[in-house]
Image (cartoon, rainbow, N blue to C red):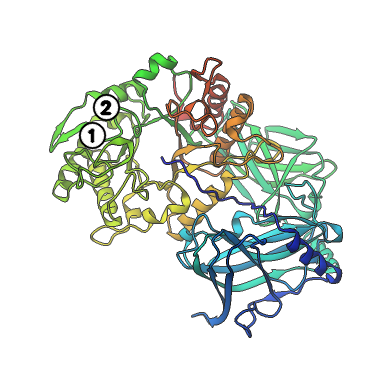
Amino acid sequence: MRLKTWLWIGACVVVLSAATLAMLQRTSASWLEADMVRGVQPVTDASQPPSGYFHQLMDDGQADGPLTVRYRSETSAQGNAVLVIALDNKSRRVTNYNLFLASSPTDVVQGGLYRISAQLSATDSVRTPLMLGLGFQLYQSGGQYLGDTSPASAMFTGVLGADQPVQASWLGGTRYEQQDKAPSSLLPRLSLYNIPPGFVGEIRLTNVGWQTPAAAQAKVEMASRQSATPPANAWAVAAGQMLPLRFALTPQEWTPDGASAATLTLRAPSGRTQAYPSDAPVIMVSDEGQALSTWQVRVPADWPAGASKLLYAQTGSSQREIGDVSVSGQTGVFIGHAFHRYPGASEKLFGPLSMRYQFARSLANDLTYLNQWWTGDGDYDWRGIDRWADFHAGTGQRRLLITFSGSPRWASQSPQQAAAMGQPGNAAPPRRELFAAYERMVRDTVSRYKDRLLAVECWNEPNSPDFFTGTQTDLADLCQLVHDGAKAVAPQLPVICPQADSPETAAFVYEARTSKGDSILSRCDVVGAHIYNRLGHDTQGRWYAAQRLDDSLELLRKINQRHGVLDKPVAVTEYGVSSCVTQPTRQHPQPFGSMPSTEAGDALYQSLGSFREKGVWMVALYSFDHENNDPKCRPGGSFTRMMRMDEQGRQVVDQAVVTRLNEAVRDFGRPDGVSTR
C-alpha cells in the first residue's frame, strides 16, 4: 500500500473569484429557461465555443501566462458531431476551465429532474489529479452563487476508456449539502480542474443532452410519473443479521422536506411478518436524481430460510411490494485483516487480539510478505509461514488469504533493484527460467494449507513500481502460474486477480494479457481493486467524508461491466483511510483521524455495511498494527483507527473502534466465516 497524495472527490466545490462572480451575476438579469440542446453545434471561430455555449478561464488573476483554448468540429465514426477542445496552459500555476453548456441558467422547479449528459474522451494527459466532468453551478434567488456540484456519475475516468457516457442530474428541491440550501437556478457545465503548468491536451465532447423542462412541463412530467412503480429489488441476508438497503420512491412518496412516516414489512411465505416502523425515514438522492428510501433493518434470528417479500407503506397509504429478500447463511461479506506482527512483537506490545476477523491476509506480515519460505527450486523453509497460519487458522478453518507477491532476492530478475518494504529485488518478477519452479512453489504451498485457505491472490498493487517492475505480460503469465498451481491441488479454491492500488489505476491489471494473448481475467475467479480514503454514510444518509465509498464501488462495477466480468465476485483486499487525504463534510466536520473514537467506529461500521450492501464478497482492512504513526494522517499508526496514542504517547488499542468492528463482523460478515476468537 502507498499513501495516496492525490485527491478525487465525487462532489467538487470550486471557489470563484470576485470577477468571475460579477460576470455571472451580470448575466442573471436576463435569465430565461435554458435552451434544450441535443448534440453539438459547429465551431465557427476557433477561439470561441459553439453557439449556445460560453467558456470561462478561471485563472482568477493568479496565472503568470495564458491558458489557451482552441475549438474545432469533427465527425465521429458513427456520424455524430464532435466538439474538440484543445487546451495549452502556458501559466506557471495551476488553473481551471469551465465550458457552460447552455446559453443561460434555468430556474429550478420543485420535483423537476434536470440532467446534463454527454460522451467524453480525452488524451492521456488528462489524468489524476486533473478532474474532468459534467456538473452544475448552483445559484440562490437573485443570482447569488451557491456552489458547484459534480457527482461521480459525471466524472471522466481514464480507466473506462474513450467515449464514456457521463451524466449529472439534479432533483428540484434537493438541498446543496455544503450550504444546506436548495438552489433556485442552475447552469450545466463541463469542467477541467487542476490544470498544471505546461499541460497540453484535448477533450472530445459528443452526444450532449441538456434536459431542462419548463415549470409547466415539469409538472406534467411529475403527474405522468405519479403511477409509475420503480423496478423490483432483490436482497440477500442471513437470519439474525443487519440488512442495509435502498430503494426508489415514487414521486408522490417524496418531497424536499423528506418522506412521511413509513413502515417496512418483511413477509414470509407462511404469512409471518416483521414490521419496521419509522417516524422519519431517511431519504438520499442518487447521482441520477432518484429519491431513495434508505434503511438498516435486522432480520430475526429465527426467520425461515428462503424467499420472503419486502413491502413498504407510508402512513395513510396502502402497501406496495418493493422486492424479494432471500434468507440464507451463504451470504454476507468476508471481513478480514492484515496484521504485521501477529504472531510476533505485537503480541507483547498490544496483548491478545480482541477483534473478530474472518480471515488474515499474508501480505505485510513480517513472516510471509516476500514469499520468503521459497528458498530454492523445490526448497522451502516453512517455519515462518507455518507459525502465521497456525496463529490465524485452526485445522479446517478457511481463514487464510495467501498473496503470492514479490520475488526473493535469489529468484529476482533484478536482485539489486530498490523496492517496497526495504527488500531489493522484491518488485521484479522471478527470472523466466524459474517460472516452472514458481508454479511448483504455488502448488506446494496451496497443498500444505488448502484446508485452511479461503482464497489465494496473485501479486500486490502491480501498477505501482514500488511493488512490480515487470510488464503486463509478465503479470498475466505469473497469474497463469498461480492459477494452474493452485487449481492442480485445490480446484475449487478461488484465485483473486492482482489488485491495483485504486479502481482508477486498475487498467494495468484488467488489460494485461499472457504471452499467448489470453486475458488475465480468464485466469481469475475474483476481481477488484484496493480502496483507500473513502467512507460510507451514517444512518441518516450523511457522508462521513467528501470522498464517498459508494463512488469507488460504482467505478469498480463500471470497470467490470466494461471488461465483461460482472459475473465474477468482487474482493477489496486492502481498505483503509488516511486523514491526510479525506476531507470532512458539513455534517461530520472532523476528518476520520480526528473523530472521537465512537464516531470513527461508527464510520468504519457503516462503511463495512456499504461493502455488504453493494455485494462485495471479501474486504480486508489494512492494517491493525502498523508502526508508522503519523498523528495527523494515521493516529496510532493504523489506517483503520483501531490504534490510538495514549497520554504517555504510547501506541495502544482503541477498544471503542475495535468493538464497533466486531459488531460489523456480526452484522455484515458471512456467517460461515465468523471468527471464533
Name the residue located 52 percent from the left edge and 43 percent from the top edge.
615
Return the disc, 1 or 2, that comes first in the chain's sequence. 2
The picture quadrant where one finds residue 507 is bottom left
**Which of labels 1 and 2 is toward the front?**
2
Residue 377 % position (x, y): 12, 38
Find disc 1 in the rendering and name its residue. Answer: 445
- Say if mark 1 contacts mark 2, CB within 8 Å: yes
Q: Residue 385 carries which label?
A: 2
Describe the element under mark 2 as helix, strand or loop: helix
Describe the element under mark 1 as helix, strand or loop: helix
The quarter of the rendered structure image containing the C terminus is top left
Residue type at the position of mark 1: Thr
Q: Is residue 314 above or below residue 13?
A: above
Residue type at the position of mark 2: Ile
Residue 193 seen in the current view = no
Name the residue located 29 percent from the left edge and 27 percent from the top edge.
367
Residue 48 % position (x, y): 64, 78
Which residue occupies the extreme front position in the image? 64
Tell which of 539 and 373 is nearer to you.
373
**Mark 2 crowd level (few <14, some 14–19, many ≥20, 10 Å Cα):** many
How far apart, in angstroms, are the residues tagged by discs 1 and 2? 10 Å
The quarter of the rendered structure image containing the N terminus is top left
Q: How many labels does the image show?
A: 2
**Mark 1 crowd level (few <14, some 14–19, many ≥20, 10 Å Cα):** many
Q: Is residue 229 above or below residue 220?
A: above
Q: In this view, does 223 lie to the left or right of 233?
A: right
Q: Which mark is residue 32?
A: none
The picture quadrant where one finds residue 83 is bottom right
